[in-house]
Amino acid sequence: MAKTFESLQWIVVELTRSAAKKGPMAFLKQESYAGSLRTSLDEVEKLSDQFDRIAMTCDRAKLHNVEKVAISTKDQIGVEHLMTNARVAQTGEAVVSELKSYLNGMAQQFKTDVASHLMAFLGSQIDSRQQILTEQAPQPLKVLSKAQRMLKQAEQQRKRTERRAAILASLQYGGAELRRDLEENLEAISTSADRVHYLVAEPQLMNWLIEPSNAVLLVNGNCAASERNTSTSFIAAKLVETIAIASAGRSGTQYGSIGLYFFCAEHFRSHADRLAGPAGLLRSFIGELLSSSASFKLRQTRKTVLTIDLSDMVQLWAMFETLVAQLPTTVVLFCILDSITEYEMSDRRPETEYLVGSLIALSRRNARAGGCVVKVLLTCPLTSRSLHYSLEPWEVIDVPDQAPAVGGFADSAWAASGVAGLLRY
């Protein structure tokens, strides 16, 4: 309002100055207009003062109302707080009372249980002391204890036998078939006796037997294609027989040799032979290993057999490798694969190369890092096409097409060769 009033005064001054320039008439008119304007300004100033007073009155009334509302809300909150505290106190007292009652019940029950157990314990001690005092011959108790241990051991052995039989049945293991294969290959060798003499006298065969680091041997027989029972098959069978004889009479598991063998030429047709093919060979090796006198974790092995695909080479190999890892380090494990070219030269070649490569890697790894000694013998009636690529020259025997003529081969010649004696180490 003050600025408006000053503006109006400035207008009056300017108008007065302008009127003075226009003459006396204009001056008179200007004076009259200025008087009326002053009167209007006075009225405006009065109205402004009246408006300020009304505004202040409204502010005071509004503040008073706000204060009344605040006081009322505070009083209401205080009342609700008191009521809430009262309810919490009542609830707490009820909970405390219930908890005390429960604890008292538990204490009473505990006293009762302790008393009953104490009475039972004291009664058993009294009976035990009376029995000790009245017994005159303690020896029968020891005899009964020994009998009980024997019964327990017999029961454990029965369970192990049942588990082993269940695993072998799941693997479709044919122990009788393998023994028949062995007997057939130990028979007539009249057409290949000279080659047998050559192989028995071969230094590489002797080194493979006696050197722990010499773990793998491949024999290319170069036999005539018409020969069914070849010299290489006879040597493989004779080694298996000798290993079995050397291991006979040993109780188990800590020392000695285990021979695993498979004659591939006897299991070539897959449509009727459950052991045919590399998967059948590996299942047979697992079955032979479990049938040996070595001790294995049969419960875990049983679970594994039930969960794996018995035609999958990778899963079967993992199972075989797990069993080999459980053998003592003093055991020599022979893996003899005869006529492996029957599988190598067929559509089973990828699986055959996987199996042979895994066996070679296992034998070399154990030779370096420890574990049982694993010796792998691969025999081929003719000549291997690809297996020799993963071997060193001193790990391969190539029998000449024309072996030196020596004559028939008898058991005495085998004994004279010293191989049987070497297999007893």
Image (cartoon, helix red, strand yellow):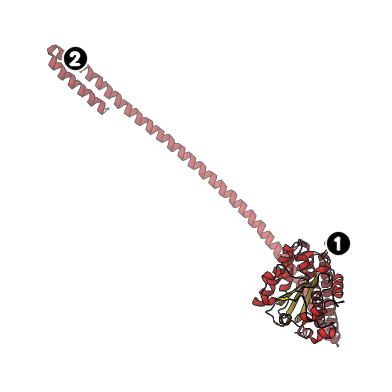
Question: How many labels, in total?
Answer: 2
Query: Would you say 92 lies left or right of 343 here?
Result: left
Mark 2 vs 1, N-terminal side: 2
Q: What residue is rendered at 74% in x and 79% in y?
A: 332
The residue that label 2 is drawn on is 32
Q: Label 1: which residue?
A: 272
SS class, disc 2: helix
- From the top left corner, tell me how far across and down residue 363 is, in percent: 69, 74
Res. 303 visible in picture? no
Locate the C terminus by quadrant.
Answer: bottom right
Give the class, few, some or many, for how many residues have Cα within 10 Å of label 2's Cα (few <14, many ≥20): few
Tell me the amino acid under the disc marked 2: Ser
Q: Residue at x 45, y 37 (%)?
A: 68
Could you say whether the residue bearing mark 1 is in a helix, strand or loop? loop
**Viewer-side residue, 253 vs 156:** 253
Residue type pointed to by label 1: Ala
Compared to residue 54, the image places residue 276 above or below, namely below
Residue located 77% across and 65% down the image? 343
From the viewer's perspective, tell me whether residue 23 is left or right of residue 91.
left
Camera sees residue 66: yes
